[in-house]
Image: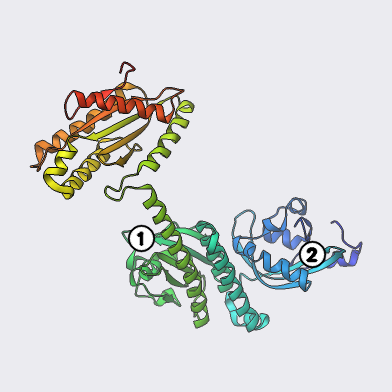
Amino acid sequence: MEALPDSGMLLAVLEHTPALVFVSEFVSGRIVYVNPAGVGLLGLGDAVHAYARTTAELFTDVGLVQAREVESALVERGEWNGLTEFRHFVTGEPIPMLISTFVLQYTRTGPSLIASIAQDRRGAEVDEQRLHRALGESAYRAREQQAIADLSQLAVGGDLDELLGAAAGAAAALMGVQCSSIAQMSDDGALAVLAYRGPEPSPTVFAPGRGSQPGFAAASGSVIVCADRVHETRFSTVGMTGRGLHSGVCVPIGSEAVWGVLTAHSRRPREYTDRDLTFLRSVTAVLSAAIRRIEAEAALVHQSLHDPLTGLPNRALARRRLDEALDAAPRGGTRVALLLVDLDDFKIVNDSLGHAGGDDALIVLARHLRSAVRPGDTVARLGGDEFVVVCEHVAGATEAVAIAARITGSLADLNRAESLDWPISASIGVALSDPECTREELVRRADSAMYRAKATGPGGYALYDGTF
């Protein structure tokens, strides 16, 4: 115990109280004292291990979201009271707590030592109204509003995973429920869990449709409340039963279409109030806006790096992939193959079939390029009738030429199998990197090989060997 008055009576009280009590430095957050109840509650092993930690390590993501509010209150008023969330150091389980924090010692520059007294509220579900009365209805409402404000701030510039974790934590802590999660819906209606707060193990997926409460909420696009699974007939409660959960509420996430679901579940039968649902809807509104922004930004990035006609990576992305491949090749002891692909007689195709026919030919070529290359190879359109294939981890010329042969063979099969308005073929130049090869040099080699292939007739390929 450090920096506390030498009082045997005070120490005896602290050592025997069932509440968690700890003292920490305000600036560094270093813990200088924690009582036995706190050591046991948080799974710290012993007090010595606690003194090597800071207060930031005691909290979950949702607890850390409150840090700015708590620090401001301590500086301005000298105290802060409210709900927060600690974590168990062994199991990782979030522990909702009712905490009172106050300044124990000041210096000339401000607060120096902070004392905190916290009570475990995991049993608060039994009588949540009593808790609300103890806190005061207005104080509890203010905590909800602060949580929404903190999430909104995080949504503006934060990472999506961080936001989802904080949102699940806020729902669990403020609703006083056993667990909360956020799951994203896939094309088949199943929901993959992206964020979870509650006892381990975390669920990984919720069944689609009537197979689970989250699936039913996503399929219906409606808030689904289950006060007691014993009386539930709308959807399967097998998942709830397996996790020992009796009640829950699921709220869809998404602006125009359902993106996923926010869940909150309790081990006990429970009626969820209008205020509970309003709070959860506010959380999902923040998430929906953030997801809409992130998806819009991702779409803009995708558009800037992909060809609108074929959907392939464009010249800028091809350059990036080639630079990355050349940088990694020496470390892996392999080589990079660059295939420059040029559609034969494209001007004639365009003049004969019109621009629409030319576009169709480019789309067909792009499709066959994708199907002929290896998994992990990058197929890109440079512009006009020029395409490029970046192949990493190539052992040598034999493997590189085999890829080119598959492409020309695929197009030959297409011409034999289908009645096309104009035969589609391509000439391919193949070049292999060496340890000192730059991107510009590799492109020059592939371009030289491609013109040699064209000179031998349509539908051929040539390997750059340094002789041309």
Quadrant where the image shows the C terminus:
top left
331 relative to 101 in the view: left or right = left
Q: Residues within 10 Å of mark 1 (few under 14, many from 20)?
A: many
447 relative to 171 in the view: left or right = left
- Residue located at (43% from left, 64% from top): 292
Hey, what amino acid is under mark 2? Ile
Q: Is residue 199 visible?
A: no
User: Picture coordinates of residue 339 (x, y %)?
Assistant: 31, 31
Residue position marked by numbered label 2 in the rendering:
114
Residue position marked by numbered label 1 in the rendering:
190
User: Picture coordinates of residue 117 (x, y %)?
Assistant: 75, 68
Q: Between 32 and 269, which is closer to the camera in this rendering?
A: 32
The label on residue 6 is: none
Instruction: Please say if 359 is above or below 162.
Output: above
The answer for how far apart the CA atoms under marks 1 and 2 are is: 47 Å
173 relative to 23 in the view: left or right = left
**Which of pointers 1 and 2 indicates the residue nearer the eye?**
2
- Residue located at (36% from left, 30% from top): 443
